[in-house]
Image (cartoon, rainbow, N blue to C red):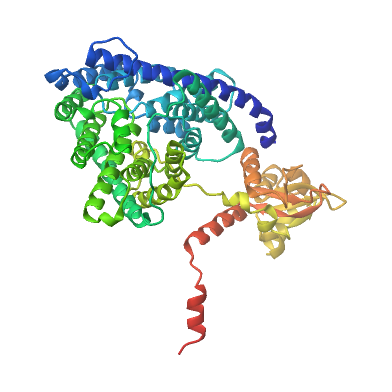
Amino acid sequence: MAADSHRRRLPLICALASLIGIIAAFAAYGLYSLITLASNAVFYHQWSLEHRDAAHHTLGLWVLVVPAMGGLLVGLMAKYGSPKIRGHGIPEAMEAVLFNRSRIAPRVALLKPFSVAVAIGTGGPFGAEGPIIQTGGALGSILGQLLQLTASERKSLLAAGAAAGMAATFSTPVAAVVLAIELLLFEYKARSFIPLVIASVLATAARFVIMGRQPMFTIGAVDFSVPSGLPWYALLGILAGFLAVGFSRALYWIEDQFERLPFDEMWWPVLGGLGLGVIAYYVPRVLGVGYGTISDILNARLALGLLAVILVAKALALLVSLGSGTSGGLLAPLFTVGAALGGLFAGVVNHLWPAAALSPNACALVAMAAVFGSAARAPFTFIIFGFELTRDYNSILPLMLVVAVAHGVTIFFMRHSIMTEKLARRGLKVHQDYEVDVLQQISVGQVMEPNPVIVPGHMTVAEIARRIADGDQQITRRQAMLVTDGDGLLAGILTRGDLVKAFERDASGSMTALEAGTAHPQVAYEDEPLSWVLPRMLHHKCGRLPVVDRGHPGKIRGYLGRAAIIEARLHRLAEDHVCDPGWLKTTLRTNPR
């Protein structure tokens, strides 16, 4: 019944997702326009939508205080508007999905873009992608709250808005869909997948109209050196993984230090802005989103020394400013750091081992995807993302290897991802692994008791009690008995609790089994998966179900209790933790020397 309801309402959700996709594209354009206006006004004293890189500013010593002024404005918005605008956006969207029934307050949808525009416009080394994802998700959530929808439907719309935001930003619709699945939905179902795809497609199409077809990053022809370069890519994956681990730990360590400060958190972004200003005075490339710097790295236009400076300075600037609790995204700055690592790695390897002939472009691209993909525990998303940037099938093998190796490193050394660590610190646990529920794989017929205790409906509770007292094994081994009518068909179910209540009402025990039990009980069928039956038991607050023949209603086939469902769970635990002896050990044991 629930599945039928979802199918009937799917066209409505798809129509709403279409609207959200188009709106999210305009929201992305609006946010980038705000950032450009703010940046040009602050660094070039011009009111213009023409993008100019803040790294080429002429502010001189004023650059030391401009980020602090932006930090103060963000601090005021967080204090008197909403504290939800702090941070990089995606953890807040995850929290809304997992712990707030996919509800995001409208003020967040309004204040988040403005806080990001102020933070980046005054030099913050952030990306707008995380905030756009959060804003798109907020738009979906708000639309879902306006209408009479379920929490699951709101979740689908929130995820559709988030995916649309990313698709409109990077023109990577497939990666946007996978990102929403890996970081927001934690499920793969048609009811959420179809709206996701529709929203991403329409957002990308709207982006073509509004912002043009040009990609966010430009990258020329790349030689990925497959298969000769694969061993080097594996080593790069290890380095990218350790960089992700180190950055994540450093970020939360810095947040901890800010929380120890003896003054109001409204002033923390000011202090972070001062630190950013000092770094930016010596390395102007850390200012702003830095798409130009990323394109330069991806096209191998920067010397090794400058790559090393960018790697260290951008990471420090991001740690100090974002750790102070300001508003901004992680995606673009971590792309810069990851790309710098890849380009630096290729340059060093080629200098020490010229025969390796690694492409700095290729190493920068795969490391860029690996650092963020492993830090966020979204490896599949950024494998697809890297491929969509290049449209070059030769990139697939290096991307898969480097991202997977980096992901393995972070799994080993990080208990939580850079996204879920913030939630874990609030006591909110996020399970990011994907697996098929064992209750969907095991049917009722596999675990039911095929020989249930059956009593005729006319038998009195006194007779049943006497048989229990006499130790009748047939009737004492179950907590419930199935009650039949004169034709031997199911008429009801009688539990031990029903027997106690019957004696409380009539101490003589003259009440019949059918009168004492529950007539017309909920039933299960042999071919049903346990995942269908468990909600029925919970909804009707019954721990035991008769199993009947689907073709002959009332014909008893067995009995299903809670213990059987627990056994199914134990079956999965055994698969995960109990090792089979294996052929080699068995052979050695049976054929000793």
Q: Is residue 121 left or right of residue 146?
A: left
Residue 584 at what x, y percent from top left? 49, 77
Q: Residue furthest right?
A: 487
Which quadrant does the N terminus fall into? top right
Residue 390 at what x, y percent from top left? 43, 38
Residue at the spot x=64%, y=43% of the render?
537
Is residue 389 placed above or below 165 in the rendered structure?
A: below
Q: Residue furthest bottom?
A: 593
Looking at the picture, tell me which residue is in the foreground, 188 or 294. 294
Residue 45 at what x, y percent from top left? 23, 11
Residue at the spot x=40%, y=43% of the render?
377
Q: Residue furthest left?
A: 61
Q: Is residue 279 left or right of residue 2?
A: left
Looking at the picture, tell me which residue is in the foreground, 513 or 26. 26
- Tell me if residue 154 can be seen: no
Residue at the spot x=34%, y=23% of the render?
85
